[in-house]
Image: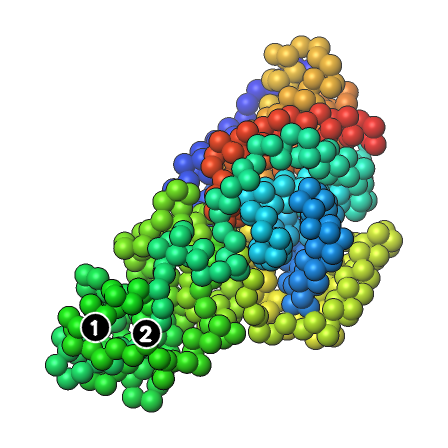
């Protein structure tokens, strides 16, 4: 197959693809901003017709992603996973290997019908509860669960974003197929199920035979539900809670809470009473006056010295804050920052957590580093473990924004356990409709969303909050880039160039090369970006080599999730902080499994298609 000459449109599209990849790797702009820049550039350069430019936002793939996020939130509201934790403990009978494998298998199955990051967010508190009740270190639990979730995402076409995109990209490719080539048909919802099941079972066998030996038995991470001694040993947060009353002679009079906190030797200021109003997590700009009462935490001798130096009256008995500091109402918790968080790059001073959310940030755990003294000036990064003190109700409300995922098992408001069976029946109905092939998958999933809303499983505002709009926006903006690769002829040109240089190669070798290239792309850009760029290219290469274009496209969609060794995978970034994993831990366990992943995908795709 001779390659045609590069046209201006081809060069513009390839340049835009290169720019997008470079910006993703550079990580100077947020992925959704990069995707939006690419979308606008496509319109300004006329590479995609204006009437099609924003069709990604109404695409079935985007609607399916939104629906799965809302359905996941509905199941979470009913406490389904709390019951699951109890069931896992009972069935495993406290045996470590059985508990790890059973939890991983169940998480993998669930990830076949929910977005992978959503499943990991739901399983973080489940793992925390299991760790607290069994004494098993989180570092022994979280990576096996995360890897099984990634593997289980291949069980259906709604398990992860690349597979959700696949049918839309296949349909779009039909517009530019050469004459005489059969139309590419969309795949059924569970078409990749045999491959996904094989991936999940191989992952479990691998973790049982090999991977578990490489996971430390030492608890390097958090088991926050156990005792306060964990926070003392890990973060230096120790001592008791005291009340300090501000006298007329105190130098604190007229100071703000933020200024008082900056004093040398100042304890943690967790609460403030001014007049008749008491509140936890007072904003930094709240003023301290005569008669104000501070609720502070620290070692008795340190608090006593601070009280004496600042002419404060110290009370060890809580007269004003007894209700606020009741463990059933408030306490210390930990939360991990996902890669999609709006907190990333901002400091505590920028976020105003106490003023906006009623939450005090006590420390930041980043790998082997713990930031305490300079916590207000430390920019937050993906995977950071944040230590909060708050009222549980405020924490639950703040967590709905999905800017952090709480890993502590804490009492949550607005749980609706009485709606459990409603949620399960509606979820089963949605999957049944999708499997019937009589109803399109996005319509079937949205039917489930409507059912949960009408039955009171989830409220409309909660549904809005459940959607990770950053993910949705990134996907919707990148979809037209894939269309441009196809319609401009850039994908066909790359395929022709590749075939001309490779010569007559085995179909299997070409498939392996595409799987490996997609895997590498997914490690430096998002799995969505890798899918959008590689699927049109893979289809063109398949047509040039006489292969099955649907099989090549499915290999790309599956390989885009084969990032098992880097925190650029959102699922792995969510567990690295809580479990204390280092990059070498992820590489050591994930690299051999990634190689097995490619082999299983290649064999499986060629058997089923």
| Mark 2 lies on residue | 242
Vertical comparison of 289 with 204: above or below? below
Query: Which residue does the image show at 48% across and 44% down from the upper left?
Result: 220
> In the shown orientation, is residue 153 left or right of residue 217?
right
Q: Residue at x 48, y 34 (%)?
A: 583
> Which residue is painted at 41% across and 36% down in the image?
26
Q: Quadrant of the N terminus?
A: top right
- Of the numbered discs 2 and 1, the one sitting upstream in the chain is 2
Q: Describe the element under mark 1 as helix, strand or loop.
A: helix
* Residue 303 drawn at (x, y percent): 26, 68
Closer to the camera in the image, 395 or 136:
136
Secondary structure beneath dot 2 equals: strand
Number of numbered discs visible in the structure rendering: 2
| Residue located beneath label 1 in the image | 307
Which residue ends up furthest to the bottom in the rendered image? Answer: 276
Vertical position of residue 27 compared to residue 8: above or below: below
Q: Residues within 10 Å of mark 1 (few under 14, many from 20)?
A: many
Residue 608 placement (x, y as % from top left): 83, 32
- Residue 171 in view here: no
Q: In the visual, does 164 lie left or right of 606?
A: left
Q: Do the numbered discs 2 and 1 sit on residues whose CB atoms are within 8 Å?
A: yes
């Amino acid at each position: 197959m001779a390659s045609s000459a590069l046209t201006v449109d081809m060069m513009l599209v390839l340049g835009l693809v290169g720019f997008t990849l470079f910006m993703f790797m550079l990580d100077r702009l947020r992925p959704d901003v990069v995707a939006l820049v690419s979308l606008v550039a496509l319109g300004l350069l006329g590479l995609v017709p204006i009437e099609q430019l924003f069709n990604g936002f109404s695409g079935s793939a985007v609607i399916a992603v939104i629906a799965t996020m809302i359905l996941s939130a509905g199941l979470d509201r009913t406490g389904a996973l709390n019951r699951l934790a109890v069931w896992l403990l009972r069935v495993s009978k406290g045996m470590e290997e059985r508990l790890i494998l059973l939890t991983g298998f169940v998480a993998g199955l669930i990830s076949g019908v929910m977005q992978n990051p959503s499943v990991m967010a739901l399983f973080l508190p489940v793992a925390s509860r299991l760790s607290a009740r069994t004494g098993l270190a989180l570092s022994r639990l979280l990576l096996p669960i995360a890897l099984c979730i990634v593997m289980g995402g291949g069980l259906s076409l709604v398990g992860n974003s690349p597979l959700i995109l696949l049918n839309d990209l296949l349909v779009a490719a039909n517009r530019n197929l050469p004459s005489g080539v059969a139309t590419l048909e969309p795949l059924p919802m569970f078409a990749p199920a045999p491959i996904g099941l094989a991936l999940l079972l191989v992952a479990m066998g691998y973790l049982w035979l090999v991977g578990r030996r490489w996971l430390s038995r030492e608890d390097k991470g958090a088991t926050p539900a156990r005792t306060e001694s964990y926070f003392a040993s890990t973060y230096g947060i120790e001592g008791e809670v005291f009340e300090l009353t501000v006298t007329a002679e105190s130098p604190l009079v007229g100071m703000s809470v933020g200024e008082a906190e900056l004093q040398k030797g100042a304890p943690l200021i967790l609460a403030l009473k001014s007049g008749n109003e008491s509140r936890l997590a007072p904003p930094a700009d709240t003023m301290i006056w005569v008669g104000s009462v501070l609720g502070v935490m620290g070692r008795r001798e340190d608090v006593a010295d601070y009280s004496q130096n600042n002419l404060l009256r110290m009370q060890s008995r809580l007269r004003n804050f007894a209700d606020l500091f009741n463990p059933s109402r408030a306490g210390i918790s930990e939360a991990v920052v996902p890669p999609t968080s709006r907190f990333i790059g901002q400091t505590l001073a920028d976020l105003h957590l106490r003023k906006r959310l009623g939450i005090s940030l006590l420390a930041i755990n980043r790998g082997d580093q713990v930031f305490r003294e300079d916590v207000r000036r430390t920019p937050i990064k993906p995977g950071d473990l944040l230590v909060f003190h708050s009222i549980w109700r405020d924490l639950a409300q703040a967590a709905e924004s999905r800017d952090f995922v709480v890993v502590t098992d804490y009492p949550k408001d607005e749980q609706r356990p009485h709606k459990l069976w409603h949620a399960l029946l509606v979820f089963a109905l949605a999957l049944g409709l999708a499997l019937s092939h009589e109803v399109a998958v996005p319509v079937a999933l949205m039917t489930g969303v409507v059912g949960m809303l009408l039955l009171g499983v989830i409220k409309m505002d909660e549904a809005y909050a459940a959607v990770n709009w950053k993910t949705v926006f990134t996907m919707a903006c990148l979809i037209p880039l894939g269309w441009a690769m196809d319609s401009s002829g850039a994908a066909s040109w790359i395929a022709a160039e590749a075939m001309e240089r490779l010569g007559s190669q085995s179909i299997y070798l070409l498939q392996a090369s595409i799987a490996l290239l997609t895997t590498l792309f997914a490690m430096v850009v998002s799995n969505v970006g890798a899918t959008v760029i590689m699927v049109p290219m893979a289809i063109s290469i398949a047509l040039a080599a006489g292969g099955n274009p649907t099989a090549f496209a499915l290999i790309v969609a599956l390989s885009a999730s084969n990032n098992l060794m880097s925190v650029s995978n959102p699922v792995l970034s969510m567990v690295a902080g809580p479990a204390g994993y280092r990059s070498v831990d992820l590489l050591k366990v994930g690299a051999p499994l990634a190689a097995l992943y490619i082999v299983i995908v290649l064999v499986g795709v060629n058997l089923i298609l």
